[in-house]
Image: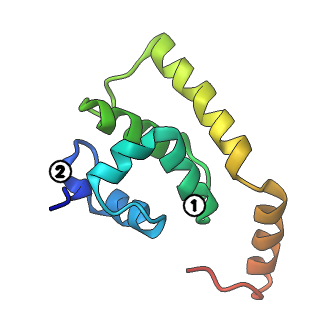
Amino acid sequence: MLTPLTTLPNIGPAMADMLAKAGIHDAETLRDLGTDAAYGALLRGGKRPHFIPFYVIEMALQGRPWNDCKGREKDALRVRFEAVKAANHDTDRAAFEAVMDAIGVVDRP
């Protein structure tokens, strides 16, 4: 039997739902993917980039409180986040969709 995402520290129902929409339905899959690949899946699924979900996933996989990381460790996470964002988030497409949404052309889920 697979372990629910919400058994991991920091992963509540909203984060679990976000991960499930990206195809990550259980703790084992999240562990196998790791933070970078899991967050990349979120971005490819249409999630807007934000450092906090990346940070939360990393701390959850380490079994630590979400706000436990500081200083150099947090700075290193920010570098990884920026690399994952650059590799998985199409800023041109996001900007285009934002304009289409603003004029009522694109329905957002």
Vertical arrangement, residue 46 with respect to residue 50, above or below: below
Corner quadrant of residue 87: top right
- The percent position of residue 13, horizontal first and vertical second, equals 27, 62
Give above or below for 88 relative to 60. Answer: below
Q: Which mark is residue 8?
A: none
Left or right: 53, with 63 as reference point: right
For disc 2, the marked residue is 7
Q: How far apart are marks 2 and 1 (CA)?
A: 23 Å
Left or right: residue 5 versus residue 80 is left
Report the residue at 37% width, 49% height from top.
30
- Rendered image quadrant of residue 106: bottom right
Image quadrant holding the C terminus, namely bottom right
**Which quarter of the rendering shows the N terminus?**
bottom left
Position in image of residue 33 (x %, y %): 44, 45
Structural crowding at the residue carrying mark 1, measured as other residues with C-alpha within 10 Å and reported as few (<14), some (14–19) or many (≥20) = some
Judging depth in this view, the residue of 100 and 38 nearest the camera is 38
- Neighbour class for label 2 at 10 Å: few (<14), some, many (≥20)? few
Residue beneath disc 1: 47
Residue 59 placement: quadrant: top left
Question: In the rendered image of this protein, does residue 53 appear above or below residue 6?
Answer: above
Q: Which residue is drawn at 24% across and 32% down?
A: 63
Residue appearing at x 36%, y 57% in the figure: 15
Give coordinates of residue 42: x percent, y percent.
53, 57
